[in-house]
Image: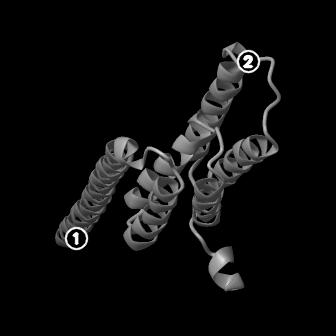
Amino acid sequence: MREALQHQPRASAAHRYIFLALVLALSGSEFWMYLTSSRAGEPVSTETVTMAVLLTASFMYAAFRPMVGGALVFAAGILEGFLWTEVALPSIFIYIMAADWISRRWYWPTFGFLGLVVSLTLVNQRDALHTFPTYITEVLVAVIAGLAMRRNGDRVERLEREAREAKEAAERAKQEIHDELAAHLHDTAVRDL
C-alpha cells in the first residue's frame, strides 16, 4: 500500500496552478457570499466551517497528489452528505475532481465515489425529488468534461508520439545520407588513388 501511494501519478505544474486558482476562486467566493448574504451577522455552524476547510484542503492536496487528494475530496463529499452543511461552492470540488479522475481513466473509483456522494446527499435532503435533476446534471457535466479532457489528452499524446516518430525518421534519414556520402567519398577517394 505504501509503495502504491509513493508511486502515484503527480500533477503537472499547469494542473497544480489550475487547481490552486480554483481553490482561491471558489473558496473566496464562498466566503464573500457569506459576508454579503442576508445572514451575514449570524454565526456559522462548526460543521459548515469544518466542511469548507476540509474540502478546500483536500482539493489543494489533490493539486499535488491527484489520487490521494481526490480520495480525500470524495471522502469529504461523503461526510458532507451525512452532515448536510451549508457549503455551496467548495462542494463543486467534488465534480471537478470527478472530471479529473475520468480524464485519468480512473472510471470505477470515480463513479463509485460520485454515486455515494449523490446518494447520501439525496437521502439526507428534504426536497430530494426536486434537486435530483440538479445532481444528475452536475454528474453529467463532470463526466462530459472529464471525457473531453481525456480526448484532448489522447490527442496531445498522439501528436507528441507523431512528432517523436518524425524526429526519429529525420535522424535515420540524416544518418542514411551521411553514410551514403561517406561511402561515395570513400569510393571516389579510392578511385582517384
The residue under the point 61% across, 40% down is 90
Task: Say above or below: 94 vs 67.
Answer: above
Disc 1 crowd rating (10 Å Cα; few below 14, some 14-19, many 20+) is few
Task: Say above or below: 1 vs 112.
Answer: below
Is residue 125 at least partly visible in the picture? yes
The residue under the point 53% across, 50% down is 94
Residue 18 location in percent, x, y? 56, 38
Q: Which residue is mark 2?
A: 35
SS for dot 2: helix
Quadrant for residue 133, please give it.
top left
Quadrant placement of the N terminus: bottom right
Pick the front one: 51 or 144: 51
Circles 1 and 2, Cβ within 8 Å, touching? The answer is no
Residue 162 location in percent, x, y? 25, 57
Q: Which residue is mark 1?
A: 183
Q: Residue furthest front?
A: 126
